[in-house]
Image (tube, grey):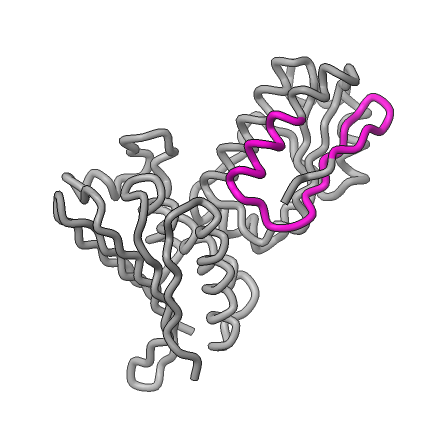
């Protein structure tokens, strides 16, 4: 199912609405890459609260999207990974290295609002 | 008791169908919480392995009963090119293709039992089980 992308100030919010097929993930990647340019967005939130499975392919795609958007000048934060999903990802040895994560949409927004503080914490 | 379910796999969309049916069967059998997610994720990985390497195959989901102990059995079968070096394919991080090399070893970690039989030119069968 197509993932709607909303513009909110300097940010884009992609809310995943149902299970994602591989094609949906690829579409999302292309949509976000386009819109970051179109709206000159500085941050992107991908809300995956409804996903009941994040397998190795989905992880690789989310990571690729985040790294690609970074090259386009936007910070990405993945929000809403459910506890069971996080557990399965850890069991699989999957990480979202180099990608921002936050508990939910609210935390995701404040994550993007505090880039200076975040960089300080990472010792940059 | 629920019966065997077969899901034929020939496209990425079928991966989603297979893991949803697996989750439903596991729930009917009494699995809950994180176990449902582990089973669904393992199915996703083996189904993707079929799509990526063999193009088509099937996933067979069935209840199993070992002396009163209930569980779910997931068989992933294809008649694809087979795996030349199974030991290598089961090494974490080893991938012949675009993947992370996580699929098969990852599925093994998510389940309680995992067996793989592959013959070059004949195909691959993965049998995995999770017990309640």
Vertical placement of residue B126 versus B62, above or below = above
- Residue furthest to the right: A9
Which residues lie in the magenta part? A5-31
A120 in magenta? no
* Residue B114 screen position, x and y as percent: 28, 58
* Residue A120 screen position, x and y as percent: 71, 18
Vertical placement of residue A61 versus B86, above or below = above
Q: Which corner quadrant of the image does residue A114 belong to?
A: top right
Residue at the image point whose x is 40% and y is 48% from the top: B45
Residue at the image point whose x is 49% and y is 33% from the top: A60
Residue at the image point whose x is 47% and y is 70% from the top: B26
The answer to whether residue A107 is seen in the rendering is: yes
* Residue A59 screen position, x and y as percent: 51, 37
Vertical placement of residue B97 versus A19, above or below = above
Q: Which corner quadrant of the image does residue A122 belong to?
A: top right
Please give left or right for residue A81 compared with residue A64 in the image: right
A26 in magenta? yes
Q: Identify the image quadrant of the C terminus of chain A.
A: top right
Residue at the image point whose x is 56% and y is 48% from the top: A86
Q: Identify the image quadrant of the N terminus of chain A.
A: top right
Please give left or right for residue B21 compared with residue A43 in the image: left
Q: How many marks?
A: 0
The answer to whether residue B38 is seen in the rendering is: no
* Residue B36 screen position, x and y as percent: 51, 63
């Amino acid at each position: 199912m197509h993932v709607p992308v909303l513009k909110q100030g300097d940010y884009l919010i992609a809310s995943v609405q149902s299970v994602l097929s591989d094609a949906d993930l690829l579409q999302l990647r292309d949509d976000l890459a386009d819109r970051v340019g179109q709206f000159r967005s500085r941050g992107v939130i991908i809300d995956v609260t409804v996903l009941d499975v994040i397998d190795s392919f989905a992880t690789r795609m989310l990571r690729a999207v985040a790294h690609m958007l970074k090259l386009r000048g936007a910070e990405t934060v993945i929000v809403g990974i459910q506890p069971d999903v996080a557990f399965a990802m850890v069991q699989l040895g999957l990480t979202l290295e180099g990608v921002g994560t936050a508990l939910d949409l609210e935390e995701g927004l404040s994550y993007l609002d505090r880039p200076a503080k975040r960089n300080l914490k990472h010792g940059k | 008791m629920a019966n065997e379910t077969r899901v034929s796999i020939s496209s990425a969309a079928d991966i989603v169908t297979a893991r949803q049916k697996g989750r439903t069967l596991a729930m009917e059998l009494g699995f809950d919480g994180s176990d449902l997610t582990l089973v669904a994720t393992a199915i996703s990985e083996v189904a993707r392995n079929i799509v990526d390497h063999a193009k088509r195959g099937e996933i067979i989901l069935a209840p199993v009963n070992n002396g009163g102990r209930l569980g779910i059995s997931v068989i992933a079968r294809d008649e694809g090119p087979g795996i030349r070096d199974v030991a290598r394919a089961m090494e974490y991080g080893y991938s012949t293709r675009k993947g992370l090399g996580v699929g098969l070893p990852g599925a093994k970690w998510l389940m309680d039992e995992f067996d793989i039989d592959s013959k070059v030119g004949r195909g691959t069968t993965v049998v995995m089980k999770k017990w309640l």
